[in-house]
Each structure stands twice: as structure tokens, then as C-alpha cells.
Image (cartoon, rainbow, N blue to C red):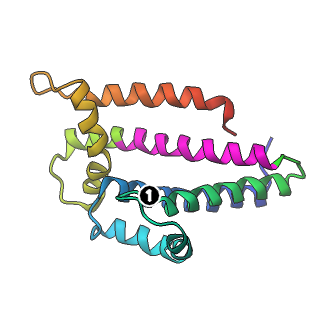
């Protein structure tokens, strides 16, 4: 059964913007290079809607919760619009829970793919000066450091991505019943 065009457009455009806003939160969290051209594009695309939220919600150290709140609002809007155009009726508390779970699940999915990308980059282009691989490495390095404390490199072999993959999959499996 196909998806109607309006729902497809809402899901695609909204999902892309949702990803960009989450990426801004995650890049700030990882203290990624602000002057990277990709970081600059993410900042430019999210600055206007974030400005009022940043005034209302103060930063807590390196945590900019306004970006996380904007991601939640965007996801909530996507769900509400899709439900509306499909003629459904989803209670507001359910939409709030699904939106919150979806934000967390999406963060985990981004980390999963970023760690996988980081592993592949380390094989084929270690030390690359391209902004994309540099940003991926900067994004995943904080969680890789945490994982290396649990599983230190063994004979030059870094097994920390395996631990990260396992943890992400376990958490996402627990979130699955609440996701939409």
C-alpha cells in the first residue's frame, strides 16, 4: 500500500530538518569543530528557529537543550501533521511520548551510523582532511573514549565500536514498543 504524497512530503522534509536539528545538538555535545563547513551549514539552517528557544532556555555547560527541544517540537509537528492528514486521532499524551522516544531513538541511530562510518573511514581514509570524515570522527570520539575505558585496545585492535553497537541495539530494542 502506497503512501499519499502529502504524508510523504511531510515525512521527508520534516525528517530531514529533524535530522539537521539533532545533528546540531550532537555536534555541540561533542564539541565538534564549529568552523567545519558542514557545521556552519547546520548552524545556519537551525539558527532562526533556535534563537527564541535559546533565550528562553539557558545552556547548561556544553548542553544546549534548546536544540533538543526544537528537535522534539519538529518531531511532534511531523507526527501531528501526518495523523491529521491521514484522518486519524492520536491522543496528545501518546504523541508526546512517541515524539520523545523518537528523538532518543534517532540520536542512537545517528550514533550507530556515525560509529560505523568512523570505522570504515579508519580503514580506507585514516587522517582524512575532508570535512565530512573529520566531523564524523569528532562526533563519535567522546563515546569511543567512554567505550575504550571499558574495553581498551588489544594489540592495536580497537574493539570499542562493538560495545557501542551492542549498547545501542539493546537500548533501541527497549524503545521499540514506544516508537512509531
Q: Is residue 144 left or right of residue 17?
A: left
Q: Which residue is mark 1?
A: 25
Q: Position of residue 172 (x, y in %)?
A: 53, 31
Q: Secondary structure at mark 1?
A: helix
Q: Position of residue 43 (x, y in %)?
A: 42, 71
Residue 18 drawn above or below residue 146: below
Q: Position of residue 137 (x, y in %)?
A: 26, 49
Q: What is the count of numbered marks?
A: 1
Q: Position of residue 84 (x, y in %)?
A: 84, 56
* Nearer to me, 12 or 43: 43
Q: Predominant secondary structure in magenta?
A: helix
Q: Is residue 2 left or right of residue 101?
A: right
Residue 175 shown in magenta: no
Is disc 1 surrounded by few (<14), some (14 to 19) or many (20+) residues within 10 Å?
Answer: many
Residue 44 drawn above or below residue 137: below
- Residue at x 48%, y 75% (from the top left corner): 47
Outermost left residue: 155
- Residue at x 18%, y 54% (from the top left corner): 128
State which quarter of the image contains the N terminus.
top right
Q: Is residue 123 left or right of residue 156?
A: right
Q: Is residue 10 left or right of residue 115?
A: right
* Nearer to me, 4 or 56: 56
- Residue at x 35%, y 59% (from the top left corner): 61
Stretch in magenta: 92-114
State which quarter of the image contains the C terminus.
top right
- Residue at x 66%, y 48% (from the top left corner): 99
* Nearer to me, 61 or 176: 61
Amino acid at each position: 500500500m502506497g503512501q499519499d504524497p502529502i504524508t510523504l512530503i511531510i515525512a521527508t522534509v520534516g525528517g530531514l530538518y529533524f535530522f539537521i536539528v539533532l545533528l546540531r545538538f550532537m555536534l555541540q555535545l561533542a564539541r565538534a569543530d564549529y568552523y567545519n563547513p558542514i557545521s556552519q551549514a547546520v548552524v545556519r539552517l537551525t539558527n532562526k528557529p533556535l534563537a527564541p528557544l535559546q533565550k528562553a532556555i539557558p545552556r547548561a555547560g556544553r548542553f544546549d537543550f534548546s536544540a533538543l527541544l526544537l528537535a522534539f517540537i519538529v518531531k511532534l509537528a511531523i507526527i501531528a501533521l501526518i495523523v491529521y492528514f491521514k484522518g486519524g486521532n492520536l491522543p496528545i499524551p501518546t504523541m508526546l511520548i512517541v515524539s520523545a522516544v523518537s528523538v532518543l531513538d534517532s540520536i542512537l541511530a545517528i550514533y550507530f551510523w556515525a560509529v560505523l562510518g568512523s570505522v570504515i573511514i579508519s580503514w580506507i581514509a585514516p587522517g582524512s582532511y575532508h570535512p565530512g570524515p573529520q566531523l564524523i570522527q569528532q562526533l563519535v570520539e567522546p563515546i569511543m573514549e567512554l567505550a575504550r575505558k571499558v574495553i581498551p585496545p588489544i594489540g592495536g585492535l580497537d574493539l570499542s565500536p562493538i560495545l557501542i553497537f551492542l549498547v545501542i541495539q539493546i537500548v533501541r530494542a527497549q524503545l521499540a514498543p514506544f516508537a512509531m
